[in-house]
Amino acid sequence: MTHPRTQIRALFVTRLVNATSAEERVFSGRLMPMEEPVLPAIVVHTRRPEDVLERSTSGWDGYEKRRCIVSVICVRQSFEDIDEELDTMAEQVEAAIQSWTIPGFESAEIGPHTTSSEDPDFEGSLTTGATTLEFPVVYLTPFRSGPNPDITGAYPGGQITSDGQTGAACPVGTATIYANQEEL
């Protein structure tokens, strides 16, 4: 199974293809050396550590709420004002992400982003620059999926299956339900 972070990163790439002046030049992964023919371009990565914000209290067949930071790096070269052109790309990325629901992660929340810029690099008459937009994405993922192996035959509401059949709730209100035979 593919890690949810990998899926989210790939979905960001798909969302940004042809949504900005980078057109189809949207890549996933760490920054790589880029040359003039592939610029402008966007690189999407999740380099920062992922946080587990909470776990369901049941401990079994539950969920974890996680937060990963998706970095969208706009890279371009220009003869003109590099800052203005990077701002335009950043605005295009913001517009594409702003009202987007991540397919397969419909309960995920994309938080407000932060932006940083790298100092431009001057190479001949062209200036190369980059702007990074970091989007926090909070999503749910299964945690300990499956029934608790320590409780055999017990179901929510006190239902018992001693013979492999779904039983009814215990008819005696003061009855004690034990988790295993050793407690008897």
Image: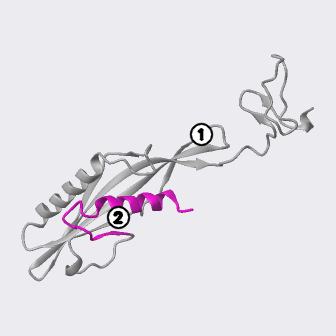
Which residue appears farthest toward the front when viewing the image? 165
Q: Does the magenta stretch include residue 72?
A: no
* Looking at the image, residue 112 lies above or below residue 118: above
User: In the current view of this chain or complex, which residue is farthest to the top?
Assistant: 173
Residue 24 location (% of width, % of height): 26, 69
Classify 37 as above or below 6. below
Q: Where is residue 147 in the image (x, y as percent from the top left)?
A: 72, 44
- SS class, disc 1: loop
Q: Is residue 14 magenta?
A: yes
Identify the mark nearer the N-term, 1 or 2: 2
As shown in the figure, which amino acid type bears the numbered disc 1? Ser
Residue that mark 1 sits on: 56
Picture quarter containing residue 167?
Answer: top right
Determine which of the numbered discs, if any, sits on residue 33 in the image: none
Relative to 177, 127 lies left or right: left
Query: Residue 36's x, y, as percent?
Result: 19, 80
Q: Distance between the residues labelled 1 and 2?
A: 30 Å
Q: Is residue 180 above or below residue 36?
A: above
The residue lying toward the viewer, choosing from 28 and 50, is 28
Quadrant in the picture for residue 129 = bottom left
Quadrant in the picture for the N terminus: bottom right
Which residue occupies 82% across, 36% down?
Answer: 165
Above or below for 111 versus 4 = above
Dot 2: element: strand
- Kindly identify the residue that appears in the image at 23 percent across and 81 percent down: 35
Residue lying furthest bottom:
124
Can you identify the residue that label 2 sits on? 44
Name the amino acid, label 2.
Answer: Val
Q: Which one is in front, 59 or 3?
A: 3
Magenta extent: 1-28
**Residue 5 location (% of width, % of height):** 47, 58
